[in-house]
Amino acid sequence: MERSESEKLILVNREPNGIAFVTINRPKSLNSLTKSMMTDMAQAFKSLDRDGSVRVIILSGAGRAFCSGVDLTSAEDVFKGDVKDLEADPVVQMERARKPIIGAIGGFAVTAGFEIALACDIVVAAKGAKFIDTHARFGIFPSWGLSQKLSRIIGPNKAREVSLTAMPLTAEVAERLGFVNYVVEEGELLKKAREIGEGILKNNQDLVLRYKSVINDGLKLDLGHALALEKERAHDYYNGMTKEQFEKMQQFIAGRSSKKPSSKL
């Protein structure tokens, strides 16, 4: 028998404007992830990425935690074999997603929850949110990117401190170090994430996808190769444009510049 909507542990909600919401919905267990939740979450991102009506994805957790990690009652099941199952791996599917993913982090993002937050393209956190890496405390080897991504975002010394001591990284410090984009009041969390999503929706959606891709792919390379990648993709992009598309672009720019500049940021 199918679960009712309120009992589903991974909720997906598509809005007509192009924003989709994925919510980890196991608040009584602080949104700890079971094996089936991981599979459902991976499938949700795959499905939303294929859906032409979806432009931006916002990920959040229900209740007072974003995600407290893997439900360790199924630890052996999860870690022994499934670490290699890419189709059921939510972080791999988030990384493969072409569409921008905004993480709305309230409360705790612990270990696997921290890694899921690191897989988002833009992160908004509520005041009091904490990112905690307990891999070293519990003897769990990281496999969703924490050992590599955190040092590249906040610097190796701070990342070593966070991971080797299992000390909390507060939302405020994470913002200062460049991992969190905004820290907001708890009640403003989804509103701010939606505001960023709406800012993305106003732009050329083909270029949004291409831009996310060239940034994320370039981050895996040294600067010289990343600049060459940008040149190569720019060349392919302009080569693929028709005369009419160039004219349309020029008309659009001319139309924008003839309007009185907006005082809004």
Image (tube, helix red, strand yellow):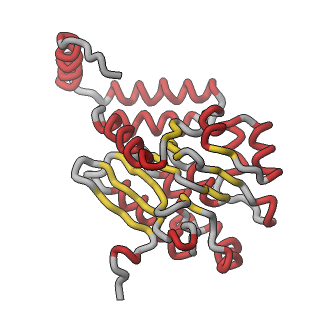
For the question of whether residue 206 can be seen, the reply is: no
Quadrant containing the C terminus is top left
Q: Is residue 81 above or below residue 110?
A: below
Task: State left or right for residue 45 relative to residue 112.
Answer: left
Q: Name the residue at 34% across, 54% down.
A: 20
Q: Name the residue at 40% across, 36% down.
A: 210
Query: Between 244 and 65, which is closer to the camera in this rendering?
Result: 65
Query: Between 213 and 200, which is closer to the camera in this rendering?
Result: 200
Task: State left or right for residue 106 relative to residue 190.
Answer: right
For the question of whether residue 9 can be seen, the reply is: yes
User: x%, y% of residue 16?
Assistant: 22, 52
Residue 262 location, quadrant: top left
Q: Name the residue at 40% across, 77% down.
A: 7
User: x%, y% of residue 117?
Assistant: 56, 51
User: x%, y% of residue 12?
Assistant: 36, 63
Task: State left or right for residue 256 relative to residue 19.
Answer: left
